[in-house]
Amino acid sequence: MASSRDTLKSYREKRDPRCTPEPMGDGRQADRPRFVIQQHAASTLHYDLRLEVDGVLKSWAVPKGPSTDPRIKRLAVPTEDHPLAYADFEGVIPEGEYGAGTVLIWDRGHYRNLKEGDERSSVAEQLEDGHATVWLEGEKLRGGYALIRTDLAQGKDWLLVKMDDEGADARRNPTSTEPESVVTGRTLAEISREAGRDEA
Ligand code: MN
C-alpha cells in the first residue's frame, strides 16, 4: 500500500503553500475515520465529499451535492487524495491558484464502514471494487450512503446514493435549506466577504 506521502503527491503538485492558505501537512490521525463535505464555489459550484481512508481523504466532487432521497442518484467524480488536515479547511483559495474560490464546511463528522467483517470489506477494498457503503454521522447528514462506480466515462464517474434507512427523507433538501457552515455558521458569501476584509 502506498504511504499517505505518496498518495498526496498529486495534491501537493497542484498547490504552492506560499500562495494558498490550504493545508499541506498530513494532519492528525483520528481515532474514528472522519468525513467532510465542503461546498466549493470554484469555476463551478460543487460539493467535495471526503472520507478518511488509510491516512488520507479520498475525495469526490459532487456537482449537486448529497441527497437524502434514496431515489436520487448524484454524480460523484473522483478527485485527488487530500491530506487529513483538509477536513478543517474553510476559507478562500486565491484567484489564479488551483481550485480558486471559497470553501465552506457544509457537514462533517465520523463514518462507519457498513460492510465491516465481510470479505474484502475494508473501505479501501470496497473502493477498489467500485462499490462502498458507509454510515455517515454528520450534523446534517445521518445514515447510509453508497458510492458506486459506473461503466460510464471509462469508470471515472461514480454515483452517490442515499440508502433507504431512518436517515432517508425524500422531502428534506438540506443543500438548499441548510446552506451554512457547520463550523462557523457562515454562508459562502460571508466567508468570501470576511476574507476580502482580512486582506484590506
Ligand atoms: Mn472542489
Image (cartoon, rainbow, N blue to C red):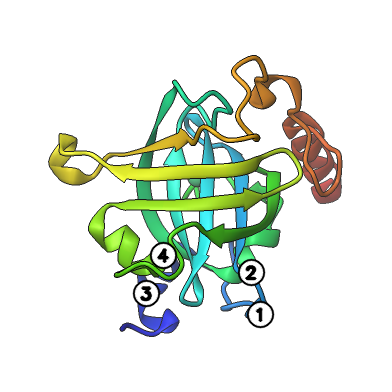
Location of residue 165 in the rendering, given as x and y in whole percent from the top left corner: 57, 35
Residue 123's disc number: 4
Q: Mark 1 — residue?
A: 28
Task: Tell me if 179 is positioned left or right of 121 in this view.
Answer: right
Numbered disc 4: secondary structure: helix
Location of residue 157 in the rendering, given as x and y in whole percent from the top left corner: 27, 39
Q: Is mark 2 within 8 Å of ligand 1?
A: no
Tag 1: residue type? Arg
Q: Mark 3 — residue?
A: 7
User: Badge 2, how many Cα within 10 Å: few under 14, some, many 20+?
Assistant: some
CA distance for labels 1 and 3: 16 Å
Numbered disc 1: secondary structure: loop
Location of residue 164 in the rendering, given as x and y in whole percent from the top left corner: 52, 32
CA distance for labels 4 and 3: 16 Å
- Residue under the image location 44 percent in, 21 percent down: 71
- Residue under the image location 60 percent in, 58 percent down: 111
Task: Compare residues 173 and 11 and report the one nearer the observer.
Answer: 173
**Image marks 2 and 1: residues in contact by CB distance under 8 Å:** yes
- The quarter holding residue 87 reads bottom right
- Mark 2 or 1 closer to N-term? 1
User: Badge 4, how many Cα within 10 Å: few under 14, some, many 20+?
Assistant: many
Task: Compare residues 106 and 174 and report the one nearer the observer.
Answer: 174
Eye-nearest disc, 1 or 4: 4
Numbered disc 3: secondary structure: helix
Residue 183 against residue 12 in the figure, above or below: above
Task: Compare residues 168 and 43 and report the one nearer the observer.
Answer: 168
CA distance for labels 2 and 1: 7 Å
Eye-nearest disc, 4 or 3: 4
Q: Mark 2 — residue?
A: 85
